[in-house]
Amino acid sequence: MDNNIKELIDILRGKINEPHEWNGLDLILTNFDDNAFGRLRILLPALQTAENGDQDEMFFTLNRNFGTSNLVFYDQAHFQTEDSYTRYKDCWDDVNIILLMPGGEMVIKEINEAASEKNLPIYNYIYYRKILDFLVSKPEFSSLHLETDLQFVILSAEKGPYYIGYTLVENRVATEKSFVPEYEDLVKNFQKMEFAKFFIDIVIEGTHSAVIKERFWKLVTNLSGLISLANRDLQIYLQKFAFEKIKSKFKEEKVKYFESLEKNIESLNKQVLAFPLTFAASVFAGFQVKDSGWILYIIFTSYALYTIVAWKILGLIRYNIKTTEQDVDGESERIKTTYQVVFSEFKGDFDKIKRKIQLVKQLHRWLHWILGGLLVLFFAFTVAYNKQLNEAAIVVKKVRQ
């Protein structure tokens, strides 16, 4: 945070301890001494803010930025209004946020500053809203969002629709522990297949005792425990019911992967057989050339064109191998993430498939370099044999003379 905004905040904080007014838009401060007023006349233009008032009474509009990256709010209520939230919702990590409290206290979150005890009232409200936005955005969790009623609806197979109310102004966030790790844990767990189904039931069980408008607050303040219980139920389900289903599906996928690898191996085998035959035929044709060296270069050009086409075919095979490898890695990561409890049962199969992919990739590299080596060898043969033909032609010409 630069010195201009620091000095401005120090002046404002000092004056807030004296009688002042706040009308929801302007902070109105009075009776500045000569030194403070003189500094303000320098600081405000430096922070791209117009001077509004005089030494006896000045208006500070807090609904717009001071400079490009400084947001100042009067208190928690002002900080949490929807208009204020819109200002920092998408850029909060890239700006300085300053909360001036009526008693002269101050809460500051600087640019890229991590969550800590001193900035927790700011961080916790931001993550309170992030948790709300995340859950409402997940169709597997929230079935309906009633924005005007400040409620969203979740559906349980057993209990039907369940209403969860929330408030957008929530001063209690300032005294709670950090919501950051709970939010990150929530996002991570929603990547697991069927987690949301169990989370819905646990949320209903954990918040039904609260009145509707308090249910989201109870969810947020007990989020870690709710996630843990939902995970417990998910693991029990996977161990008891899902294993055979996953095993059957993976068996089908495994057959598909091996079939794809076999096709790629078959294509490489065809190239293995074609390389020596083509090379031998080209060399044999070269030896049949008696007096015309240019024909030898035509044969080399033909072999070079064949090599280019063969490289293109190898490129297509490489693409197929890469696609299969990506599918295997994706399936492995999906099972590891979503069905972690049963992943160990399939790890050996994945290792075998990945090992075979590595062997096929190794064979592909060898063929690629061998094909290039054969082209270089045939070029050397063409140059040397053509030189030999030229020398022989010179000797014959001298004999005839």
Image: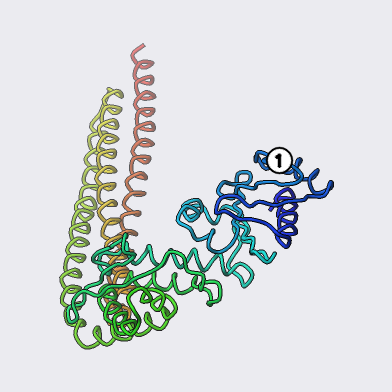
Return the residue at label 1: 46
Location of residue 388 (image quadrant): top left
Between 330 and 285, the one nearer to me in the picture: 330
Q: In the rendering, at what x and y percent does residue 191 appear?
A: 33, 69
The quadrant of the rendering that contains the C terminus is: top left
Element at label 1: helix
Amino acid on which disc 1 is placed: Ala
Give neighbour class at mark 1: few <14, some 14-19, many 20+ (Cα, 10 Å).
Answer: some
* Residue reaching furthest to the right: 35
Query: Is residue 158 shown to the viewer in this render?
Result: yes
How was this image coloured? rainbow
Quarter of the figure with residue 138: bottom left
The residue that appears at 38% across and 69% down in the rendered structure is 166
Q: Is residue 381 left or right of residue 40?
A: left
Q: Considering depth in this image, is 352 or 378 the residue closer to the camera? A: 352
- Direction top: furthest residue: 401
Residue 31's place in the image compared with 259, above or below, is: above
Total numbered labels placed on residues in the image: 1
In the visual, does 9 lie left or right of 235? right
The picture places residue 176, in percent across and down from the top left corner, at 53, 77
Identify the residue shown where x is 68% and y is 66%: 103
In the image, is residue 342 above or below residue 154? Answer: below
Across and down, in percent, residue 152 comes to 29, 67
Mark yes or no: residue 355 visible. Answer: no
Q: Where is residue 160 in the image (x, y as percent from the top left)?
A: 18, 77
